């Protein structure tokens, strides 16, 4: 399962510098589509996903006898791919395909070791137009396609039906505003046992921003104005004030250390509502917990959410046969038929809307209530975090600002202005 973790969005600047140093191998002479090739596939997944990737590799090989797929995690977790990729590129031992966070795209674009997939994306069998627009935008840097979307998720409101029933409250619905959300959180908060209406991750980093960016965008905010920080605008102050008032004034939102603690408190019935993603459904469905899922509260009719499109990046080994085989495998892997075998088993959503019409997804929705609502919520992904060098610094600074405010240490204006001043020289 892939989910937003503290520190998830790191720069690949070190890798970008190393990439250009590896462009010294001699090109191979192409021998044709049936030439024997071995493809190394770094999945970026934990060992739990090892069986899934091995099974898919064997399935592909059964119809492509000249190709051998070697699936490997690449690192102990996805963040660890940065160091492994950097070292491998320096040593000339890097994979043919690797999972990559979308925020790495700008650094990857600076490399001459990445396959340019612009022409490839236009091929009919790729079904590029069927992928969510936010994912396509992340994969495209300066007009050049540098990866294929691997994952698209989003954040919605998950609520405990029993706690709402106990307080005699109507369940959240599609037309909820942030004022409705705040009022319900206050009504859910109480002692015996100690219950909070909601919780916001307040440990800093990207975790703290999953609740901030959607409301910020709904209020008309833009993270950057060109290369200048713009998150300290009126929209930023207004969004953070809403979160602050619930946490500090109402005391209806618990300031959790991170997203994991937030989910743990929801599972133990100490939290009535959380803003989280489909990655928690597998854990919730195994509990005697009656929960529901609905899109985020809105500002007017705007219910924008936040997503983290990630990529499959294909590396160039100066071997046309390997490059061709890598492209063919990724086309197969991201097809509707195979995508549901991969992403659904990892607790993710199908990449395309057409994948949601498959029998596999219908079965998935039965097993994991709320999956259908998360899939529909993809339509509320309107923007993505900027793929710029320095986003990791921006994310850390804004996340820390949110944490300071939720703990009652600073005002929204003060904290965001300080974050903007710290970030200004870091954006490239």
Image (cartoon, rainbow, N blue to C red):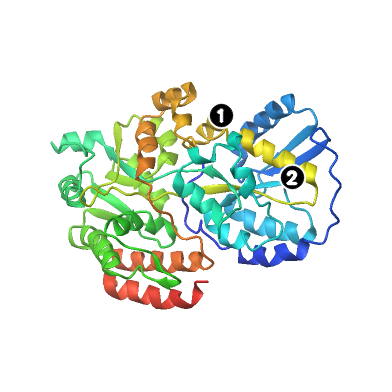
Q: Which residue is mark 2?
A: 323
* Left/right of residue 346 with respect to residue 42 in the rendered view: left
Q: Quadrant of residue 323?
A: top right
Q: Is residue 109 above or below residue 183?
A: below
Element at label 2: helix
Q: Return the x and y of residue 27 as percentages of the image width and height.
A: 84, 53
* Residue found 44% across the figure and 40% down from its top: 279
Q: Is residue 9 above or below residue 228?
A: above
Q: Which residue is mark 1?
A: 341
Q: Return the x and y of residue 67 as percentages of the image width and height.
A: 77, 33
* Residue found 22% across the figure and 39% down from its top: 172
* Residue projecting furthest to the left: 168
Q: Nearer the viewer, mark 1 or mark 2?
A: 2
Q: Return the x and y of residue 48 as percentages of the image width and height.
A: 59, 37
Does the residue at mark 1 contact the one at mark 2 (Cβ under 8 Å)?
no
Can residue 271 be seen here? The reply is no
Q: Around disc 1, counting alpha carbons within 10 Å, would you say few (fewer than 14), some (14 to 19), or many (20 or more)?
A: some
* Residue found 51% across the figure and 44% down from its top: 2
Q: Quadrant of residue 127?
A: top right
* Left/right of residue 306 with respect to residue 331 in the rendered view: left
């Amino acid at each position: 399962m892939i989910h937003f973790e503290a520190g998830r969005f790191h720069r690949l600047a070190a890798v970008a510098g190393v990439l250009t140093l590896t462009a010294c191998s001699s090109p191979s002479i192409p021998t044709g589509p049936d030439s024997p090739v071995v493809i190394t596939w770094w999945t970026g997944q934990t060992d739990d996903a090892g069986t899934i990737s091995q099974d898919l590799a064997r399935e592909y090989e059964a119809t492509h006898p000249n190709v051998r797929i070697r699936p490997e995690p690449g690192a102990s977790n996805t963040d660890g791919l940065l160091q492994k990729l950097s070292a491998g590129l320096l040593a000339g031992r890097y994979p043919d395909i690797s999972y990559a966070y979308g925020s790495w795209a700008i650094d990857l674009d600076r490399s001459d070791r990445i396959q340019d997939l612009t022409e490839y994306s236009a091929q009919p069998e790729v079904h590029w137009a069927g992928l969510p627009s936010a994912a396509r935008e992340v994969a495209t840097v300066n007009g050049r396609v540098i990866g294929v979307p691997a994952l698209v998720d989003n954040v919605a409101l998950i609520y405990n039906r029993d706690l709402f029933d106990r307080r005699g409250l109507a369940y959240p619905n599609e037309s909820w505003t942030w004022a409705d959300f705040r009022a319900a959180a206050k009504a859910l908060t109480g002692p015996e046992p100690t219950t909070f209406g909601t919780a916001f991750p307040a440990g800093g980093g990207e975790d703290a921003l999953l609740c901030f960016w959607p409301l910020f965008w709904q209020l008309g905010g833009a993270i950057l104005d060109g290369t200048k920080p713009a998150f300290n605008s009126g929209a930023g102050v207004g969004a953070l004030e809403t979160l602050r008032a619930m946490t500090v004034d109402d005391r209806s939102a618990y300031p959790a250390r991170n997203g994991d603690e937030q989910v743990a408190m929801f599972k133990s019935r100490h939290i009535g509502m959380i803003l989280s993603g489909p990655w928690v459904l597998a854990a919730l469905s195994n509990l005697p917990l009656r929960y529901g899922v609905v899109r985020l509260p809105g500002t007017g009719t705007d219910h924008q959410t936040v997503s983290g499109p990630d990529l499959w990046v294909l590396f160039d080994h100066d071997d046309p046969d390997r490059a061709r085989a890598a492209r063919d495998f990724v086309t197969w892997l991201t097809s509707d038929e195979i995508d549901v075998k991969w992403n659904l088993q990892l607790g993710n959503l199908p990449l395309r809307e057409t994948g949601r019409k498959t029998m596999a997804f219908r079965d998935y929705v039965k097993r994991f209530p709320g999956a259908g609502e998360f899939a529909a919520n993809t339509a509320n992904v309107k923007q993505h975090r900027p793929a710029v060098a320095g986003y990791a610094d921006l994310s850390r600074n804004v996340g820390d600002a949110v944490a300071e405010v939720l703990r009652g240490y600073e005002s929204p204006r003060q904290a965001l202005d300080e974050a903007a001043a710290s970030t200004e020289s870091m954006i490239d």
